[in-house]
Image: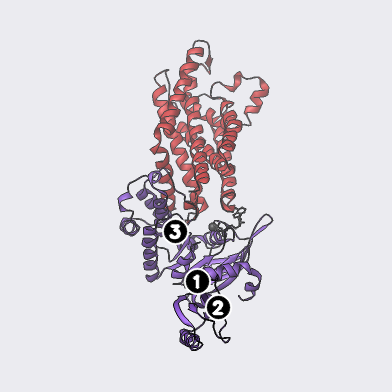
Chain colours: A purple, B red
Amino acid sequence: MAVPDAIHIEQVSKQFGALKALDQITLKIAQGEVFGLLGPNGAGKTTLISTLAGLARPSSGRVSVMGFDVQTDYRQARRQLGVVPQELVFDPFFTVRETLRIQSGYFGVKNNNKWIDEILENLDLTSKANANMRTLSGGMKRRVLVAQALVHRPPVIVLDEPTAGVDVELRQTLWRFIRRLNADGHTIVLTTHYLEEAENFCQRVAMLKAGRIVLLDTMQNVLRQVSAHTLRVKFDGSPPASLTFTADAGDGWYAMPFEQFDQVEPILLSLRQSGCIVRDVEIGKPELEDVFIRVMQAGNEASQAV
Amino acid sequence: MSGEFSTLFYKETLRFWKVGFQTVAAPVLTAVLYLLIFSHVLDNHVRIHDVQYTAFLIPGLVMMSVLQNAFANSSSSLIQSKVTGNIVFVLLAPVSYQNFFLAYVLAAVLRGILVGFFVLVVTMWFAPLSFVAPWWILVFALLGGAVLGSLGVVAGIWADKFDQLAAFQNFLIMPLTFLSGVFYSIHSLPSFWQGLSHWNPIFYMIDGFRYGFFGVSDVSPWQSLAVGGGALLVLSAFTLTMLERGYKLRA
Ligand SMILES: Nc1ncnc2c1ncn2[C@@H]1O[C@H](COP(=O)(O)OP(=O)(O)OP(=O)(O)O)[C@@H](O)[C@H]1O
Ligand SMILES: [Mg+2]
Protein backbone atom coordinates (compact mmCIF):
# COMPACT_ATOMS: atom_id res chain seq x y z
CA MET A 1 0.00 0.00 0.00
CA ALA A 2 1.19 3.47 -0.82
CA VAL A 3 2.16 5.76 2.02
CA PRO A 4 -0.78 8.07 2.61
CA ASP A 5 -0.36 11.81 2.57
CA ALA A 6 -0.15 13.36 6.01
CA ILE A 7 -2.86 15.73 4.89
CA HIS A 8 -5.05 15.49 1.86
CA ILE A 9 -7.48 18.31 1.18
CA GLU A 10 -9.58 17.98 -1.93
CA GLN A 11 -11.72 20.75 -3.38
CA VAL A 12 -12.75 22.01 0.00
CA SER A 13 -15.06 25.00 0.21
CA LYS A 14 -16.49 26.52 3.34
CA GLN A 15 -19.32 28.98 3.31
CA PHE A 16 -20.26 31.18 6.26
CA GLY A 17 -23.54 32.67 5.12
CA ALA A 18 -22.67 34.80 2.11
CA LEU A 19 -18.94 34.64 2.83
CA LYS A 20 -16.82 32.06 1.07
CA ALA A 21 -14.13 31.48 3.67
CA LEU A 22 -12.57 28.65 1.66
CA ASP A 23 -12.94 28.39 -2.08
CA GLN A 24 -12.06 25.08 -3.73
CA ILE A 25 -8.90 24.39 -1.80
CA THR A 26 -6.88 21.40 -2.93
CA LEU A 27 -3.71 20.66 -1.03
CA LYS A 28 -1.59 17.62 -0.29
CA ILE A 29 1.06 17.58 2.38
CA ALA A 30 3.42 14.62 2.47
CA GLN A 31 4.59 12.90 5.61
CA GLY A 32 7.66 14.48 7.14
CA GLU A 33 7.17 17.90 5.58
CA VAL A 34 7.33 21.23 7.36
CA PHE A 35 4.61 23.16 5.63
CA GLY A 36 3.66 26.82 6.02
CA LEU A 37 0.20 28.26 5.52
CA LEU A 38 0.57 31.96 4.93
CA GLY A 39 -1.87 34.72 4.23
CA PRO A 40 -3.23 37.98 5.59
CA ASN A 41 -5.82 38.21 8.37
CA GLY A 42 -9.05 36.61 7.30
CA ALA A 43 -7.50 34.64 4.42
CA GLY A 44 -8.94 31.39 5.75
CA LYS A 45 -5.95 29.74 7.42
CA THR A 46 -7.72 29.00 10.69
CA THR A 47 -10.83 27.87 8.86
CA LEU A 48 -8.76 25.42 6.84
CA ILE A 49 -7.19 24.06 10.01
CA SER A 50 -10.65 23.78 11.56
CA THR A 51 -11.85 21.59 8.73
CA LEU A 52 -8.78 19.39 9.22
CA ALA A 53 -9.49 19.08 12.90
CA GLY A 54 -13.20 18.46 12.52
CA LEU A 55 -14.04 21.73 14.29
CA ALA A 56 -15.76 22.93 11.15
CA ARG A 57 -17.44 20.88 8.48
CA PRO A 58 -16.62 21.80 4.91
CA SER A 59 -19.57 22.85 2.76
CA SER A 60 -18.10 20.61 0.07
CA GLY A 61 -14.97 18.62 -0.53
CA ARG A 62 -13.07 15.99 1.41
CA VAL A 63 -10.31 16.07 3.98
CA SER A 64 -8.21 13.22 5.28
CA VAL A 65 -5.34 12.96 7.74
CA MET A 66 -2.87 10.10 7.30
CA GLY A 67 -5.41 8.47 5.04
CA PHE A 68 -8.33 8.72 7.49
CA ASP A 69 -11.32 10.76 6.42
CA VAL A 70 -11.98 13.41 9.05
CA GLN A 71 -15.72 12.84 8.92
CA THR A 72 -16.36 9.19 8.27
CA ASP A 73 -13.32 8.03 10.24
CA TYR A 74 -13.09 10.93 12.66
CA ARG A 75 -11.77 9.01 15.62
CA GLN A 76 -8.77 7.65 13.74
CA ALA A 77 -8.21 10.98 11.98
CA ARG A 78 -8.15 12.91 15.25
CA ARG A 79 -5.68 10.48 16.81
CA GLN A 80 -3.26 11.35 14.01
CA LEU A 81 -3.54 15.06 14.60
CA GLY A 82 -2.29 17.47 17.26
CA VAL A 83 -3.63 20.99 16.90
CA VAL A 84 -2.38 24.11 18.65
CA PRO A 85 -5.29 26.56 18.41
CA GLN A 86 -4.72 30.19 17.57
CA GLU A 87 -6.82 31.46 20.46
CA LEU A 88 -5.22 31.36 23.89
CA VAL A 89 -7.72 29.04 25.54
CA PHE A 90 -7.37 27.18 28.83
CA ASP A 91 -9.45 25.59 31.54
CA PRO A 92 -9.12 27.71 34.70
CA PHE A 93 -10.10 24.83 36.97
CA PHE A 94 -6.92 22.84 36.51
CA THR A 95 -3.17 22.89 36.93
CA VAL A 96 -0.76 22.42 34.02
CA ARG A 97 -0.18 18.78 34.84
CA GLU A 98 -3.87 18.06 35.32
CA THR A 99 -4.59 19.72 31.99
CA LEU A 100 -2.07 17.47 30.24
CA ARG A 101 -3.24 14.32 31.99
CA ILE A 102 -6.83 15.04 31.09
CA GLN A 103 -5.87 15.73 27.49
CA SER A 104 -4.02 12.39 27.36
CA GLY A 105 -7.11 10.69 28.70
CA TYR A 106 -9.31 12.14 25.97
CA PHE A 107 -7.07 10.33 23.52
CA GLY A 108 -7.22 7.14 25.53
CA VAL A 109 -3.55 7.37 26.50
CA LYS A 110 -2.92 6.13 30.01
CA ASN A 111 0.17 6.32 32.22
CA ASN A 112 1.56 9.13 30.15
CA ASN A 113 3.60 10.78 32.89
CA LYS A 114 6.98 10.11 31.37
CA TRP A 115 6.10 11.71 28.05
CA ILE A 116 4.32 14.57 29.80
CA ASP A 117 7.46 15.24 31.83
CA GLU A 118 9.50 15.24 28.66
CA ILE A 119 7.21 17.72 26.94
CA LEU A 120 7.20 19.96 30.00
CA GLU A 121 10.97 19.88 30.07
CA ASN A 122 11.29 20.70 26.39
CA LEU A 123 8.91 23.62 26.65
CA ASP A 124 10.49 24.94 29.82
CA LEU A 125 7.36 24.35 31.83
CA THR A 126 8.64 21.95 34.47
CA SER A 127 8.64 24.56 37.21
CA LYS A 128 5.02 25.44 36.39
CA ALA A 129 3.72 21.87 36.33
CA ASN A 130 1.64 22.30 39.44
CA ALA A 131 0.59 25.89 38.88
CA ASN A 132 -3.02 26.65 38.10
CA MET A 133 -3.58 27.60 34.47
CA ARG A 134 -5.09 30.91 35.56
CA THR A 135 -1.82 32.02 37.11
CA LEU A 136 0.29 31.55 33.98
CA SER A 137 1.40 34.40 31.74
CA GLY A 138 0.17 34.52 28.16
CA GLY A 139 3.34 33.04 26.70
CA MET A 140 3.27 30.19 29.20
CA LYS A 141 -0.35 29.45 28.39
CA ARG A 142 0.71 29.25 24.75
CA ARG A 143 3.37 26.69 25.70
CA VAL A 144 0.76 24.61 27.49
CA LEU A 145 -1.35 24.69 24.33
CA VAL A 146 1.60 23.30 22.42
CA ALA A 147 2.11 20.67 25.10
CA GLN A 148 -1.55 19.68 24.95
CA ALA A 149 -1.33 19.12 21.23
CA LEU A 150 1.54 16.68 21.73
CA VAL A 151 0.33 14.45 24.58
CA HIS A 152 -0.82 11.68 22.27
CA ARG A 153 2.30 11.82 20.07
CA PRO A 154 0.41 12.68 16.90
CA PRO A 155 2.24 12.07 13.62
CA VAL A 156 0.82 15.33 12.24
CA ILE A 157 1.16 18.55 14.23
CA VAL A 158 -0.65 21.69 13.22
CA LEU A 159 0.28 24.98 14.87
CA ASP A 160 -1.91 28.01 14.29
CA GLU A 161 0.36 30.97 15.02
CA PRO A 162 2.39 29.24 17.72
CA THR A 163 4.69 32.19 18.21
CA ALA A 164 2.14 34.98 18.53
CA GLY A 165 2.84 36.86 21.75
CA VAL A 166 5.82 34.74 22.63
CA ASP A 167 9.19 36.14 23.67
CA VAL A 168 12.40 35.63 21.69
CA GLU A 169 13.79 32.99 23.99
CA LEU A 170 10.72 30.81 23.92
CA ARG A 171 10.43 31.27 20.21
CA GLN A 172 13.84 29.73 19.83
CA THR A 173 13.05 26.96 22.29
CA LEU A 174 9.85 26.29 20.46
CA TRP A 175 11.44 26.15 17.04
CA ARG A 176 14.19 23.89 18.30
CA PHE A 177 11.56 21.55 19.71
CA ILE A 178 9.54 21.63 16.51
CA ARG A 179 12.65 20.86 14.50
CA ARG A 180 13.35 17.91 16.73
CA LEU A 181 9.81 16.63 16.33
CA ASN A 182 10.18 16.96 12.58
CA ALA A 183 13.49 15.11 12.69
CA ASP A 184 11.69 12.35 14.60
CA GLY A 185 9.33 12.02 11.67
CA HIS A 186 6.42 14.26 12.62
CA THR A 187 4.79 16.26 9.89
CA ILE A 188 4.49 19.93 10.79
CA VAL A 189 1.98 22.41 9.44
CA LEU A 190 2.06 25.94 10.73
CA THR A 191 0.72 29.39 10.17
CA THR A 192 2.57 32.50 11.12
CA HIS A 193 2.63 36.18 10.31
CA TYR A 194 6.38 36.24 10.94
CA LEU A 195 7.51 35.50 7.41
CA GLU A 196 11.09 35.14 8.49
CA GLU A 197 10.11 32.17 10.62
CA ALA A 198 8.32 30.60 7.72
CA GLU A 199 11.34 31.21 5.53
CA ASN A 200 13.64 29.54 8.02
CA PHE A 201 11.51 26.53 8.80
CA CYS A 202 9.14 25.64 6.01
CA GLN A 203 10.14 23.44 3.13
CA ARG A 204 6.95 24.28 1.30
CA VAL A 205 4.35 27.02 1.58
CA ALA A 206 0.88 27.85 0.44
CA MET A 207 -0.24 31.44 0.34
CA LEU A 208 -3.92 32.01 0.87
CA LYS A 209 -5.90 35.03 -0.10
CA ALA A 210 -9.64 35.37 0.42
CA GLY A 211 -10.10 31.63 0.73
CA ARG A 212 -8.04 30.64 -2.31
CA ILE A 213 -4.54 29.32 -2.71
CA VAL A 214 -2.69 31.92 -4.74
CA LEU A 215 0.75 30.36 -4.52
CA LEU A 216 1.89 26.85 -3.68
CA ASP A 217 5.49 25.77 -4.02
CA THR A 218 8.69 24.82 -2.27
CA MET A 219 10.28 27.60 -0.31
CA GLN A 220 13.28 27.50 -2.63
CA ASN A 221 11.15 27.96 -5.72
CA VAL A 222 9.02 30.61 -4.12
CA LEU A 223 12.06 32.64 -3.23
CA ARG A 224 13.59 32.15 -6.65
CA GLN A 225 10.47 32.47 -8.72
CA VAL A 226 9.32 35.93 -7.87
CA SER A 227 12.37 37.57 -6.51
CA ALA A 228 16.11 37.21 -7.01
CA HIS A 229 19.18 38.25 -5.10
CA THR A 230 19.85 41.95 -5.21
CA LEU A 231 23.25 43.50 -5.65
CA ARG A 232 23.43 46.93 -4.09
CA VAL A 233 26.47 49.06 -4.98
CA LYS A 234 27.59 52.51 -3.98
CA PHE A 235 29.99 54.15 -6.40
CA ASP A 236 31.26 57.42 -7.77
CA GLY A 237 30.94 58.10 -11.49
CA SER A 238 28.32 57.11 -14.03
CA PRO A 239 27.68 53.44 -14.84
CA PRO A 240 28.02 52.05 -18.37
CA ALA A 241 24.86 51.80 -20.47
CA SER A 242 25.17 48.02 -20.50
CA LEU A 243 24.24 47.89 -16.83
CA THR A 244 20.66 48.68 -15.87
CA PHE A 245 20.66 49.82 -12.29
CA THR A 246 17.76 51.23 -10.42
CA ALA A 247 19.00 54.22 -8.52
CA ASP A 248 18.14 54.28 -4.85
CA ALA A 249 16.94 57.42 -3.13
CA GLY A 250 19.72 59.58 -4.49
CA ASP A 251 22.18 58.59 -1.77
CA GLY A 252 24.67 57.09 -4.22
CA TRP A 253 23.33 53.53 -3.92
CA TYR A 254 22.33 51.55 -6.99
CA ALA A 255 20.57 48.22 -7.06
CA MET A 256 20.37 45.38 -9.58
CA PRO A 257 18.79 41.91 -9.35
CA PHE A 258 20.84 38.88 -10.28
CA GLU A 259 20.28 35.15 -10.44
CA GLN A 260 23.65 33.50 -9.95
CA PHE A 261 26.58 34.61 -7.85
CA ASP A 262 28.99 34.28 -10.82
CA GLN A 263 27.20 37.26 -12.33
CA VAL A 264 28.45 39.55 -9.55
CA GLU A 265 32.09 39.70 -10.53
CA PRO A 266 31.49 40.77 -14.16
CA ILE A 267 29.13 43.53 -13.01
CA LEU A 268 31.73 44.95 -10.67
CA LEU A 269 34.37 44.57 -13.36
CA SER A 270 32.46 46.53 -15.98
CA LEU A 271 31.83 49.26 -13.39
CA ARG A 272 35.54 49.52 -12.77
CA GLN A 273 36.33 49.45 -16.49
CA SER A 274 34.04 52.40 -17.11
CA GLY A 275 35.87 54.39 -14.47
CA CYS A 276 33.54 54.09 -11.56
CA ILE A 277 34.98 53.78 -8.07
CA VAL A 278 33.13 51.29 -5.93
CA ARG A 279 32.68 52.51 -2.34
CA ASP A 280 30.45 49.85 -0.83
CA VAL A 281 28.72 46.61 -1.78
CA GLU A 282 25.76 44.76 -0.26
CA ILE A 283 24.07 41.60 -1.35
CA GLY A 284 20.39 41.30 -0.48
CA LYS A 285 18.93 37.81 -0.21
CA PRO A 286 15.49 37.23 -1.69
CA GLU A 287 12.97 37.65 1.08
CA LEU A 288 9.72 35.87 1.51
CA GLU A 289 8.20 39.15 2.51
CA ASP A 290 8.83 40.57 -0.97
CA VAL A 291 7.16 37.58 -2.53
CA PHE A 292 4.31 37.73 -0.09
CA ILE A 293 3.59 41.38 -0.75
CA ARG A 294 3.82 40.96 -4.48
CA VAL A 295 1.60 37.90 -4.50
CA MET A 296 -1.00 39.51 -2.31
CA GLN A 297 -1.09 42.64 -4.43
CA ALA A 298 -1.35 40.74 -7.66
CA GLY A 299 -3.40 37.84 -6.36
CA ASN A 300 -5.14 37.23 -9.63
CA GLU A 301 -2.10 36.90 -11.85
CA ALA A 302 -0.27 34.72 -9.38
CA SER A 303 -3.18 32.34 -9.04
CA GLN A 304 -2.58 31.33 -12.62
CA ALA A 305 0.94 30.31 -11.72
CA VAL A 306 -0.34 27.56 -9.41
CA MET B 1 -16.38 3.32 26.45
CA SER B 2 -12.78 3.70 27.37
CA GLY B 3 -10.30 6.18 28.65
CA GLU B 4 -12.13 8.96 26.86
CA PHE B 5 -15.34 8.50 28.75
CA SER B 6 -13.75 8.01 32.15
CA THR B 7 -11.47 11.01 31.62
CA LEU B 8 -14.27 13.34 30.61
CA PHE B 9 -16.39 12.07 33.50
CA TYR B 10 -13.46 12.53 35.88
CA LYS B 11 -12.82 16.03 34.57
CA GLU B 12 -16.46 17.00 34.96
CA THR B 13 -16.51 15.64 38.49
CA LEU B 14 -13.23 17.25 39.47
CA ARG B 15 -14.52 20.54 38.10
CA PHE B 16 -17.45 20.79 40.49
CA TRP B 17 -15.59 19.19 43.35
CA LYS B 18 -12.86 21.84 43.20
CA VAL B 19 -15.49 24.49 43.81
CA GLY B 20 -17.55 22.30 46.12
CA PHE B 21 -18.40 25.19 48.37
CA GLN B 22 -20.44 26.74 45.57
CA THR B 23 -21.62 23.58 43.88
CA VAL B 24 -22.46 21.37 46.84
CA ALA B 25 -22.47 23.26 50.14
CA ALA B 26 -24.41 26.30 48.92
CA PRO B 27 -27.37 24.38 47.48
CA VAL B 28 -27.56 22.27 50.64
CA LEU B 29 -27.86 25.45 52.67
CA THR B 30 -30.57 26.78 50.35
CA ALA B 31 -32.63 23.63 50.74
CA VAL B 32 -32.30 23.71 54.51
CA LEU B 33 -33.47 27.33 54.56
CA TYR B 34 -36.56 26.36 52.53
CA LEU B 35 -37.27 23.62 55.03
CA LEU B 36 -36.89 25.88 58.07
CA ILE B 37 -39.19 28.54 56.68
CA PHE B 38 -41.92 26.36 55.21
CA SER B 39 -42.06 23.95 58.10
CA HIS B 40 -42.18 26.83 60.58
CA VAL B 41 -45.14 28.35 58.77
CA LEU B 42 -47.07 25.25 57.78
CA ASP B 43 -46.16 22.29 59.92
CA ASN B 44 -49.00 22.63 62.41
CA HIS B 45 -51.65 23.37 59.80
CA VAL B 46 -51.12 20.95 56.95
CA ARG B 47 -51.09 17.19 56.60
CA ILE B 48 -50.78 15.53 53.22
CA HIS B 49 -51.50 11.84 52.58
CA ASP B 50 -51.77 11.73 56.36
CA VAL B 51 -48.13 12.71 56.62
CA GLN B 52 -46.92 15.63 58.70
CA TYR B 53 -46.10 18.56 56.37
CA THR B 54 -42.39 18.79 57.19
CA ALA B 55 -41.93 15.09 56.59
CA PHE B 56 -43.82 15.44 53.29
CA LEU B 57 -41.69 18.40 52.30
CA ILE B 58 -38.28 16.77 52.90
CA PRO B 59 -38.32 14.31 49.96
CA GLY B 60 -39.60 17.13 47.75
CA LEU B 61 -36.68 19.34 48.71
CA VAL B 62 -34.20 16.51 48.31
CA MET B 63 -35.50 15.77 44.82
CA MET B 64 -35.58 19.44 43.89
CA SER B 65 -31.92 19.67 44.89
CA VAL B 66 -31.08 16.62 42.80
CA LEU B 67 -32.85 18.06 39.77
CA GLN B 68 -31.59 21.63 39.97
CA ASN B 69 -28.01 20.66 40.62
CA ALA B 70 -27.95 18.07 37.88
CA PHE B 71 -29.19 20.70 35.46
CA ALA B 72 -26.79 23.32 36.78
CA ASN B 73 -23.79 21.04 36.45
CA SER B 74 -23.98 20.09 32.81
CA SER B 75 -25.39 23.39 31.61
CA SER B 76 -22.93 25.66 33.39
CA SER B 77 -19.95 23.50 32.57
CA LEU B 78 -20.80 23.49 28.88
CA ILE B 79 -21.52 27.17 28.58
CA GLN B 80 -18.35 28.06 30.45
CA SER B 81 -16.34 25.84 28.15
CA LYS B 82 -17.97 27.37 25.12
CA VAL B 83 -17.59 30.97 26.23
CA THR B 84 -13.96 30.52 27.29
CA GLY B 85 -13.27 28.36 24.25
CA ASN B 86 -11.74 25.41 26.07
CA ILE B 87 -14.47 23.11 24.72
CA VAL B 88 -12.06 22.83 21.80
CA PHE B 89 -9.91 20.40 23.78
CA VAL B 90 -12.71 17.87 23.84
CA LEU B 91 -13.75 18.60 20.28
CA LEU B 92 -10.21 17.96 18.99
CA ALA B 93 -10.08 14.59 20.71
CA PRO B 94 -11.56 11.36 19.39
CA VAL B 95 -14.34 11.48 21.97
CA SER B 96 -17.48 9.97 20.46
CA TYR B 97 -20.66 11.95 20.90
CA GLN B 98 -22.16 9.08 22.91
CA ASN B 99 -19.28 9.21 25.39
CA PHE B 100 -19.55 12.97 25.50
CA PHE B 101 -23.24 12.70 26.38
CA LEU B 102 -22.74 9.97 28.96
CA ALA B 103 -19.89 11.76 30.71
CA TYR B 104 -21.74 15.06 31.05
CA VAL B 105 -24.98 13.43 32.15
CA LEU B 106 -23.41 11.06 34.65
CA ALA B 107 -21.32 13.81 36.24
CA ALA B 108 -24.52 15.84 36.51
CA VAL B 109 -26.30 12.89 38.14
CA LEU B 110 -23.42 12.48 40.55
CA ARG B 111 -23.53 16.10 41.66
CA GLY B 112 -27.32 16.03 41.93
CA ILE B 113 -27.29 12.92 44.05
CA LEU B 114 -24.45 14.19 46.19
CA VAL B 115 -26.31 17.42 46.98
CA GLY B 116 -29.56 15.51 47.49
CA PHE B 117 -27.85 13.11 49.85
CA PHE B 118 -26.46 15.93 52.00
CA VAL B 119 -29.81 17.69 52.01
CA LEU B 120 -31.39 14.48 53.22
CA VAL B 121 -28.78 13.92 55.91
CA VAL B 122 -29.24 17.43 57.25
CA THR B 123 -33.04 17.66 57.01
CA MET B 124 -34.04 14.17 58.15
CA TRP B 125 -33.65 15.27 61.77
CA PHE B 126 -36.45 17.80 61.47
CA ALA B 127 -39.28 15.32 61.08
CA PRO B 128 -39.91 11.58 61.36
CA LEU B 129 -39.15 10.05 57.95
CA SER B 130 -39.75 6.52 56.83
CA PHE B 131 -37.98 4.70 54.02
CA VAL B 132 -40.65 2.30 52.85
CA ALA B 133 -39.16 1.45 49.46
CA PRO B 134 -35.54 2.58 49.23
CA TRP B 135 -35.07 1.21 45.72
CA TRP B 136 -37.72 3.53 44.39
CA ILE B 137 -35.92 6.40 46.10
CA LEU B 138 -32.71 5.54 44.30
CA VAL B 139 -34.34 4.83 40.96
CA PHE B 140 -36.17 8.16 40.84
CA ALA B 141 -33.15 10.09 42.05
CA LEU B 142 -31.08 8.60 39.22
CA LEU B 143 -33.81 9.09 36.68
CA GLY B 144 -34.52 12.69 37.70
CA GLY B 145 -30.81 13.52 37.73
CA ALA B 146 -30.37 12.01 34.27
CA VAL B 147 -33.35 13.84 32.77
CA LEU B 148 -32.23 17.20 34.12
CA GLY B 149 -28.57 16.49 33.39
CA SER B 150 -29.55 15.84 29.81
CA LEU B 151 -31.69 18.98 29.68
CA GLY B 152 -28.62 20.79 30.99
CA VAL B 153 -26.59 19.50 28.06
CA VAL B 154 -29.23 20.78 25.65
CA ALA B 155 -29.39 24.17 27.37
CA GLY B 156 -25.62 24.50 27.66
CA ILE B 157 -25.15 23.78 23.97
CA TRP B 158 -28.07 25.90 22.80
CA ALA B 159 -27.23 29.00 24.85
CA ASP B 160 -24.58 31.32 23.44
CA LYS B 161 -24.51 33.58 26.44
CA PHE B 162 -25.03 33.27 30.15
CA ASP B 163 -28.27 35.26 30.10
CA GLN B 164 -29.79 32.86 27.58
CA LEU B 165 -28.97 30.04 29.93
CA ALA B 166 -30.50 31.99 32.80
CA ALA B 167 -33.66 32.44 30.73
CA PHE B 168 -33.82 28.70 30.06
CA GLN B 169 -33.46 28.10 33.77
CA ASN B 170 -35.95 30.73 34.92
CA PHE B 171 -38.65 30.15 32.33
CA LEU B 172 -38.46 26.40 31.96
CA ILE B 173 -36.61 24.58 34.71
CA MET B 174 -37.81 26.61 37.69
CA PRO B 175 -41.53 26.54 36.76
CA LEU B 176 -41.33 22.83 35.96
CA THR B 177 -39.76 22.00 39.30
CA PHE B 178 -41.80 24.37 41.43
CA LEU B 179 -45.08 23.31 39.80
CA SER B 180 -44.38 19.64 40.23
CA GLY B 181 -45.42 19.06 43.81
CA VAL B 182 -42.21 19.82 45.66
CA PHE B 183 -44.09 21.81 48.28
CA TYR B 184 -47.56 20.26 48.05
CA SER B 185 -49.60 17.36 46.79
CA ILE B 186 -51.20 18.20 43.48
CA HIS B 187 -54.50 16.93 44.92
CA SER B 188 -54.67 20.19 46.81
CA LEU B 189 -54.63 22.11 43.49
CA PRO B 190 -57.67 23.34 41.52
CA SER B 191 -58.53 20.81 38.85
CA PHE B 192 -57.10 22.90 35.98
CA TRP B 193 -53.67 22.96 37.56
CA GLN B 194 -53.97 19.36 38.55
CA GLY B 195 -54.59 18.48 34.93
CA LEU B 196 -51.66 20.59 33.83
CA SER B 197 -49.32 18.95 36.34
CA HIS B 198 -49.96 15.61 34.72
CA TRP B 199 -48.18 16.92 31.65
CA ASN B 200 -45.09 17.72 33.68
CA PRO B 201 -42.67 14.79 33.73
CA ILE B 202 -40.96 16.21 36.79
CA PHE B 203 -44.18 15.80 38.76
CA TYR B 204 -43.95 12.04 38.22
CA MET B 205 -40.37 11.88 39.34
CA ILE B 206 -41.04 13.73 42.55
CA ASP B 207 -44.18 11.73 43.18
CA GLY B 208 -42.39 8.43 42.63
CA PHE B 209 -39.46 9.58 44.75
CA ARG B 210 -41.82 10.43 47.59
CA TYR B 211 -43.49 7.04 47.23
CA GLY B 212 -40.16 5.50 48.18
CA PHE B 213 -40.35 7.24 51.54
CA PHE B 214 -44.00 6.97 52.52
CA GLY B 215 -45.45 4.25 50.32
CA VAL B 216 -48.21 6.62 49.22
CA SER B 217 -48.32 8.80 46.13
CA ASP B 218 -50.62 10.64 43.76
CA VAL B 219 -50.06 8.13 40.97
CA SER B 220 -48.58 4.63 40.91
CA PRO B 221 -44.76 4.56 41.01
CA TRP B 222 -44.81 2.28 37.98
CA GLN B 223 -46.64 4.90 36.01
CA SER B 224 -44.14 7.48 37.21
CA LEU B 225 -41.31 5.22 36.19
CA ALA B 226 -42.82 4.81 32.73
CA VAL B 227 -43.26 8.55 32.26
CA GLY B 228 -39.83 9.40 33.68
CA GLY B 229 -38.14 6.68 31.66
CA GLY B 230 -39.99 7.76 28.54
CA ALA B 231 -38.94 11.36 29.10
CA LEU B 232 -35.33 10.28 29.51
CA LEU B 233 -35.42 8.22 26.32
CA VAL B 234 -36.91 11.00 24.22
CA LEU B 235 -34.60 13.61 25.66
CA SER B 236 -31.52 11.42 25.25
CA ALA B 237 -32.39 10.71 21.64
CA PHE B 238 -32.87 14.43 21.03
CA THR B 239 -29.60 15.37 22.76
CA LEU B 240 -27.62 12.66 21.01
CA THR B 241 -28.90 13.80 17.64
CA MET B 242 -27.92 17.35 18.48
CA LEU B 243 -24.43 16.22 19.47
CA GLU B 244 -24.02 13.97 16.47
CA ARG B 245 -24.80 16.85 14.15
CA GLY B 246 -22.39 19.07 16.04
CA TYR B 247 -25.13 21.66 16.58
CA LYS B 248 -23.44 24.90 17.74
CA LEU B 249 -20.27 22.99 18.59
CA ARG B 250 -18.82 22.32 15.15
CA ALA B 251 -19.27 25.10 12.60
N1 LIG C 1 -17.61 30.87 12.62
C1 LIG C 1 -17.56 31.81 11.66
N2 LIG C 1 -18.68 32.43 11.26
C2 LIG C 1 -18.64 33.36 10.28
N3 LIG C 1 -17.52 33.75 9.66
C3 LIG C 1 -16.37 33.19 10.02
C4 LIG C 1 -16.32 32.18 11.04
N4 LIG C 1 -15.04 31.79 11.18
C5 LIG C 1 -14.32 32.51 10.31
N5 LIG C 1 -15.11 33.35 9.60
C6 LIG C 1 -14.68 34.25 8.52
O1 LIG C 1 -13.93 33.49 7.59
C7 LIG C 1 -12.83 34.24 7.10
C8 LIG C 1 -11.56 33.47 7.33
O2 LIG C 1 -11.26 33.48 8.71
P1 LIG C 1 -10.01 32.74 9.34
O3 LIG C 1 -10.14 32.82 10.81
O4 LIG C 1 -9.89 31.41 8.73
O5 LIG C 1 -8.81 33.66 8.85
P2 LIG C 1 -7.25 33.51 9.15
O6 LIG C 1 -6.58 33.34 7.85
O7 LIG C 1 -7.02 32.48 10.18
O8 LIG C 1 -6.93 34.95 9.73
P3 LIG C 1 -5.92 35.40 10.92
O9 LIG C 1 -4.60 35.57 10.31
O10 LIG C 1 -6.49 36.70 11.33
O11 LIG C 1 -5.99 34.38 11.97
C9 LIG C 1 -12.89 35.58 7.79
O12 LIG C 1 -13.51 36.48 6.94
C10 LIG C 1 -13.74 35.33 9.02
O13 LIG C 1 -14.43 36.49 9.38
MG1 LIG D 1 -6.30 32.46 12.04
The image position of residue A169, as x and y in percent, is 36, 59
Q: Amino acid at mark 3?
A: Thr
Q: Amino acid at mark 1?
A: Glu
Displayed-image quarter of ligand 2: bottom right
Mark sitting earlier along the chain (1/2): 2
How many residues crowd mark 3 within 10 Å: few (<14), some (14–19), many (20+)? many
Please state the chain letter of the residue tagged with numbered disc 3 in the rendered image.
Answer: A
Q: Are marks 3 and 1 on the same chain?
A: yes
Please state the chain letter of the residue tagged with numbered disc 2 in the rendered image.
Answer: A
Residue A8 appearing in the image: no
Check the image and report above or below for B201 versus A15: above
Instruction: Check disc 1 and report the residue beneath it.
Output: A287
Residue A211: name its quadrant: bottom right
Quadrant showing the C terminus of chain A: bottom right
Mark sitting earlier along the chain (2/3): 3
The image position of residue B250, as x and y in percent, is 57, 53
**Image point (48%, 50%), residue name:** B99
Residue B110 appearing in the image: yes
The image position of residue A46, as x and y in percent, is 54, 59
**Image point (49%, 25%), residue name:** B61
- Report the Cα–Cα distance between label 3 and label 1: 20 Å
Check the image and report above or below for A239 versus B80: below
Tell whether B17 sits left or right of A13.
left
Tell whether A60 sits left or right of A67.
right
Check the image and report above or below for B103 versus A15: above
Check the image and report above or below for B217 versus B69: above
Instruction: Check disc 3 and report the residue beneath it.
Output: A163
Q: Amino acid at mark 2?
A: Gln
Q: Are marks 1 and 2 on the same chain?
A: yes
**Residue sitting nearer the eye, A198 or B15:** A198
Residue A225 image label: 2
